[in-house]
Amino acid sequence: MCGIVGYVGPKKAAPILLDGLRRLEYRGYDSAGLAVHDGREIEVVRAAGKLENLANALEQRPLCGSTGLGHTRWATHGRPSEQNAHPHAAGDVAVVHNGIIENYLELKHELQASGVRFASDTDTEIVAHLIHRALEQGAPNLFGAMRQALGRLRGAYALAAISRREPDRLVIAKNASPLVVGVGEGETLCGSDIPALLGSTRNMLFLEDGEMAELTASGVRIETVEGKPVERAPRRIDWSAVQAEKGGYKHFMLKEIFEQPRAVEDTLRGRINLDEGDVVEAELGLDAQAARSIERVVLVACGTSHHAALVGRYWIEQLARVAAHTELASEVRYRDPVFGPKDLVVAVSQSGETADTLAAVKAAREGGARVLAIANVLDSAIPRASHGSLYTHAGPEIGVASTKCFTTQLVALLLLAVHLGRRRGALDAERGREILQALLELPNELRWTLARKADIHQVARHWHNAPHMLFLGRGLGYPIALEGALKLKEISYSHAEGYAAGEMKHGPIALIDENMPVVVVMPRDRQYEKTLSNLQEVRARDGQVIAVVTEGDAEAKKLAQWVLELPKMPELTQPVAAVVPLQLLAYYIADLKGTDVDQPRNLAKTVTVE
Ligand code: F6R
């Protein structure tokens, strides 16, 4: 999510760090900063907004010195601002961080109780204070102090730190967030991603989870957090800068599809209390009294986010036992909608800036409703206009067609449904626990599904020239069918329609003949038998069926010409996995047709116009 660069060597660090950050700029960020050791002190310069602002600040306050850290921030804790930008300093130490510290509140309270005053709202500053405290309490050096601090952290991190007392080294550590070391001629670098280092070296090694390292101009020393030495030789990375940005994938969209297990993990991180079968979510601001007073939930959104809202509606009705509706924000804003104080309005938006959704939020607030935002961009307009927010932690999404933002919106909506269900007394701890356990299993189920990409590619090869494609689904599968059709039309420009399978006989069945490919989303769920009959209706009219089914579905295999499998998994979380083959199908078809997958014609990532 955030970008990290570190340098130690004979050259002036600041220009190298800034160059590294520029090479990470494509990923998006909201603020940036550098910390450089000038031989006596650590100087920190930070700026909100674009790197240009940081470059201007550096002109005013040039940083001398040849050991330093740089960072571009994508906010997760604390709004985007100069004060929250990294590096964060405490005592003699400066730290940059990528990831999410799960137990940051607990640690923050502990540090505050011992007299620490915080200068930012970030989880990262806690790490700086923990390292500083370890040094004060006798840790032998920065490496030892980092090790002690790591012992207190739960969560995902790529960390890099420098200390005033040790001007010639960086200390880094990794758990669940990537960290790369670049080994140059008489200089050593680190970065969150390969592109950050390509201006200096192509000799790189990758830290593994649970490892830490000390970087000096003459090289790198790696140990596990437990203190076991690790030998690892650098290897040469021959990727071009453009390949490196995409992590070796052909397009950002493909990279983002494959990032979904990680994005889901990050969105769940720190939010699940299995003992209580409950969701820990302070930002929502919904206590039991507020939750019980809700008589109607209205989900407002556009496009892909609207499809996530449609799934959310099922979950909220089922788990929280409250009437739930969805509205296209672009429609509701032009009606004369009736909202009232007993309504909970949930605005779903990956960008958090969509003009239509923002207008719907304003209309809901004018009517006296309580508004919650589900967004991927911290402190964007929609969360700012809402009473509470639940952020997805998908990280920056560059492909215009949304993929990982959609799956993490689903995860956030299921968390919200459990949260509401528990507060309203509609869901007991046991069932809450079962659902949360199902959510925790999702990343592996997504990996399982992604590993079957060859089957999906085969279908794409067969059908990429089809002018039309129909997508059918029932229940939780219906919004997934809509999303599959939207993905296909957005990026391949093929005509696609999503339909509720039960609506087939009311019209679309007239389209079916031997030239019509029909994707049927039919994992094993309570609707299965009915959807199977729809499949039979299509086959009886010579339609060509691509069935998205649960592993081992012999019946569907007999009937459908192509079968794309999902793992055996709980019914409630199936939609999150079921969309993955459809994302890949759209991607492969578009790629075979040679369209501009990442920037499809006529589309924008953030739609701030009506
Ligand atoms: C499609 C897509 C769009 C957005 C829609 C709303 O892949 O991304 O349909 O979902 O423009 O945008 P957000 O979610 O930013 O409100």
Image (cartoon, grey):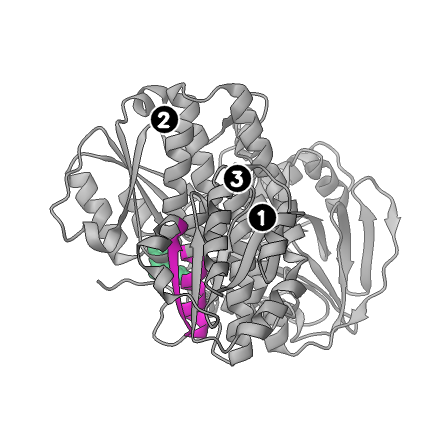
Question: What is the crowding at mark 2: few (fewer than 14 residues within 10 Å), some, or many (at least 20)?
Answer: some
Residue at point 58%, 48% (across, down) = 99
Query: Is mark 3 in CB contact (under 8 Å) with mark 2?
Result: no
Question: What is the crowding at mark 3: few (fewer than 14 residues within 10 Å), some, or many (at least 20)?
Answer: some
Q: Position of residue 35 (x, y in %)?
A: 57, 57
Q: Vertically, is 444 above or below 284?
A: below
Which residue is under mark 1? 99
Real-space Cα separation, disc 3 to disc 1, in angstroms: 35 Å
Residue 327 visible in the picture: yes
Which residue is under mark 2? 321
Going by the image, does 134 lie left or right of 560? right
Q: Position of residue 70 (x, y in %)?
A: 58, 60
Residue at point 67%, 47% (across, down) = 552
Query: Is mark 1 in CB contact (under 8 Å) with mark 2?
Result: no
Which residue is under mark 3? 525
Real-space Cα separation, disc 3 to disc 2, in angstroms: 20 Å
Front residue of 309 and 15: 309
Real-space Cα separation, disc 1 to disc 2, in angstroms: 35 Å
Image quarter in which the N terminus is found: bottom right
Label 2's element? loop
